[in-house]
Amino acid sequence: MTINVGSSSYLPYDPAMGLQDPALVASILASAVDVTILMNSEGVICDQVIAGADLPRNMFTGWPGKSMYETVTVESRSKIEQLLGEAGSGMPRWRQVNHPLLGGLDVPISYSAVKAGPQGHIIAIGRDMSTVSQLQQRLLSAEQAVEQEYQRLRNSETRFRVLLQSATDAIIIVDARSGRVAECNPASANLLGRSLKRIEGANFEDIFAPEDWADVKVALENLRNAGRTEDIVLRPSQDRQQAVLSFSMFRQENSTYYLLRMVPHAVGTSAVILPKAQSKVVKIISEMPDGFIVTDTDMKILTANSAFLELVQLASEEQARGMTLDNWLGRRGVDVGLMVSQLELKGEIRNFHTIVRGQFGAVEDVEVSAVAVTEGETPCFGFSLHHVSRQKANNTKQDQSLLRSVDEFTKLVGKVPLKELVRESTDIIERLCIEAALQMNGDNRAGAAEMLGLSRQSLYVKLHRYGIDDMGLTETAN
């Protein structure tokens, strides 16, 4: 029996045998391919298997005496039948089959078979397709990633279209370079008394009356120079009622756009429209580096500053207004519910550690402070989000972590049974999770048990087990 892995086996040359000896033919072909297998006419592997050094050495163990069908996966057996049937046809084809290995891995090899010798022996020559298979897998993964990105962009565009069409405020998007209207919604057409077709693509200046355009032009200059400007009041006309015009600016695909929001204002009303710069408090809040949001009691956003919009990756305040804070802050259905409970109970929250999820997948660590304002006709909540650097958060977690390093665990392998290592790791992780839940809930055991999905009794048992109940933690009554 000859099984040569990693080298080519050449039999002594006998001119009398010529090329009628299948073993000699197999030895010659082995120099040009990765694997050569000699079989009888029934497809049973003889004692001649020659393979290259790149293939696993234990792959061919026990092959001699087995049928070729037994060396491949179930889905490849039909290809072996076709391969043997085409061996004597004179036009053999290459067919890729998979050979199973221990550990669940498969080795793809492409075979072609020919008949040799007077007894009908079959020689199968194969090429290792592992590299090609890996490239195909990488290509497939790249195509899937591109398709997912396209799908995300399509979903974002759909959400933008729905928000634009359903917004009750008049919204107009203008290309700053050309000065023409790029997008507008039905509310803008109703407010301006024109059809959407007449507004889209029109010159931005033509939308306004000459006496209003002078104020709009000054506002746009301030927006370009300072990045912000004051709201202006548009005069009523025959086609348009009095309206308040707000400005903002954003960039997309290396182009600058103006976002205009027009809110109708009934003529004769006693309401007074104040520029934002006249209120120092409003100006400070709008420009402060920490995120600031005001919500109603249902956690729907009423207003937000630019720092919050940057955290959640939104272009304008209009995209956030009316949405629930749970869409971006903390874990869905958990953190915001805990904060509401604390606000209703105590009226304030200090340094609540959680995360902010951006519209496009970014995640930031923040500390939240909040206050409940219950006076007046419309109670509301105010939230301040202070950004915590990820490095600082990671260092804090590392200081509090009791986990062993990977090197330490590696050194224990062979000295400590695996079950004990796994049990010790599980205990450490469980304790860290309990301590984190207690810290996030202000040492409120009831809230920590709810966050961890445990009953209070189970949490008490684990606190006693890890000695956490001796740390002076208190439970806040519901």
Image: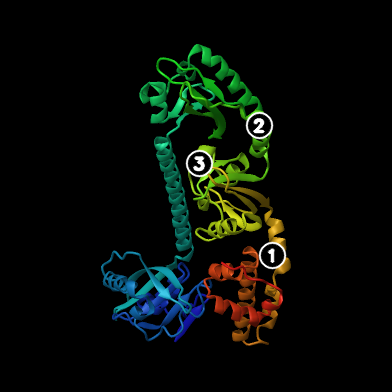
Q: Which residue is mark 3?
A: 321
Q: Amino acid at mark 2?
A: Ser
With 359 as the anchor, is 306 left or right in this view? right
Disc number lying in front (1 or 2): 2
Instruction: Look at 42% across and 48% down and name the residue there.
Output: 151
Location of residue 390 (image quadrant): bottom right
Q: Nearer the viewer, residue 430 or 350?
A: 350
Mark closer to the chain start, 1 or 2: 2
User: Quick one: SS at disc 2?
Assistant: loop
Say above or below: 110 vs 377: below
User: Quick one: SS at disc 1?
Assistant: helix
Instruction: Look at 42% across and 69% down and name the residue there.
Output: 109
Q: Which residue is mark 2?
A: 279
In the rendered image, residue 414, in percent from the top left (x then y), is placed at 66, 86
Instruction: Look at 52% across and 75% down and name the residue there.
Output: 455
In the rendered image, residue 256, in percent from the top left (x then y), is placed at 55, 29
Residue 254 visible? The answer is: no
Q: Quadrant of the N terminus?
A: bottom left
Q: Amino acid at mark 3?
A: Arg
Q: Which residue is mark 1?
A: 397
Q: How is the image coloured?
A: rainbow
